[in-house]
Image: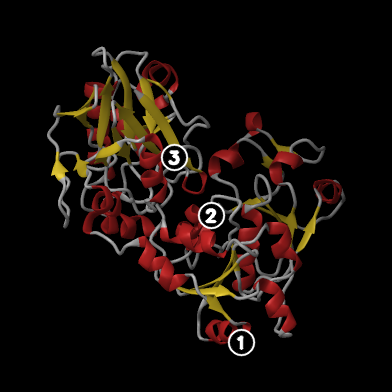
Amino acid sequence: MYIEQLYTNCLAEAAYWIESDGEAVVIDPIRETTPYINKAKERGVTIKYIFETHFHADFVSGHIDLSKQTGAEIVFGPGADTKYHIHQATDGETFQVGKITFRVLHTPGHTPESTCYLLIDENGKEHAVFTGDTLFVGDVGRPDLLDGKMSKEELAGMLFDSLNNKLKKLSDDVLMYPAHGPGSSCGKNIGKETWSTIGQQKASNYAMKITDRGEFIATVTDGLSAPPQYFFKDAMINKNGYENIDQVLARNVVPVSSLAAKEAVESGALVLDTRTADEFEKGFIPGSTFIGLDGTYAVWVGTLIDINTKLLIVASAGKENEAILRLARVGYENVIGYLEGGIDSWKKANFPIDTMKSVNPDEFAAAMNSSSHDAVLDVRRPGEWNNGHAQGAEHVCLSNFGKPDGTDTVDKDKPYYVHCAGGYRSVIAISILKQRGYTNLVNVRGGWRELEKLEFPKVLPELV
């Protein structure tokens, strides 16, 4: 038996490869199929099944194309209704893969069809459970993604039953492999680890420790930020089917001259600048949205940009294909191409360039210790803010920037220092604020991870 977690940092998503005696299963594959096809060839095995834990909302799964290319059967849990052929498993059904067995555990709550797959090893021992978005390390899947078809309270009640009637009954030593890690919007506050055991989660996961149904429903549904709007589009794509990714890339990975790019921008295309924050601040096309490839790129694109927006990509040399591929993973296919020659070609054409001002953490601290200083805008998540922030700072979570009115509380007449945890999200925030007419903005390099080490007026957790 062989188990491998295939983790995609950009999506904070875990797919799984499990094999035994020449046969393999892929669980929750990402959209491009090449990694799985190559792995099967390298290891000399046949992909027998593709298990889907649910209709993913945060990325386009590769199950359809992988099935077409390998002949592997797509398996969903009870209640999964698709427009393509699948095997809709029943609760408790088993699947033989080499010398190991998978048992279907229907665990509705995150979605009605959510299903876990329990792996039973060659000796008949329950070895691991693949929990999808039902159970994460330190968290559970959010129950508010059915867009009014079922209330979050109804789904949370189903989730309570699934945890108590299925997952809590497993032995403490059963390994727990979830579909997501930290940074995913599929949970409220997912832990740092990408795997655990059932016993560890019983002892430490707040949702696994609650025994009262009403308390569970109230706790799990409290404090949920609005899900990114692309979630609902991706869930439907996964349910109804999609175009082959190679065809999408052939259409989207095309060079666009600086003149054609300028005309596209003037016609309403949005420039998505995917370089590093340092490169971006030194010079970018006015009106660009910065979302760098070196962060959770696809997640932030899906959170902040409408899926139907026409996009022009600015990328570092050699990164153009990656930038567009990672967009396709989350269903963003309205790409006119990438700026040929990168930002240098735009500069050589003498087209307008904008820049961004940044300061180091010690400069920020010195300003905060002075008698008067600029306002502070903190764009971290609520949990991060509650763990400590600058005294007098204003708080607007970056996820709110995806709404037209999401930054209305930010005063256009004030000068602001803008920071996040490390300096990535703050540059995204400033790029969007500049689009909306804000002009006096300064980025704080290093973010709160550096600022919390310095002496200046703060509000710390015990004082929140």
- Front position in the image: 329 or 145: 329
Residue 280 location (% of width, % of height): 69, 64
**Helix, strand or loop status at disc 3:** loop
**Mark drawn on residue 297:** 2
Q: Is residue 215 left or right of residue 76?
A: right
Vertical order, 385 against 427 (above or below)? above
Q: Nearer the viewer, mark 3 or mark 2?
A: 2
Q: Amino acid at mark 3?
A: Lys
- The residue lying at 24 percent from left, 26 percent from top is 98
Q: Nearer the viewer, mark 1 or mark 3?
A: 1
Vertical order, 373 against 200 (above or below)? below
**Residue behind mark 3:** 188
Q: Amino acid at mark 2?
A: Tyr
Where, quadrant-wise, is the C terminus in this rendering? top right
Q: Amino acid at mark 1?
A: Leu
**Residue behind mark 1:** 259
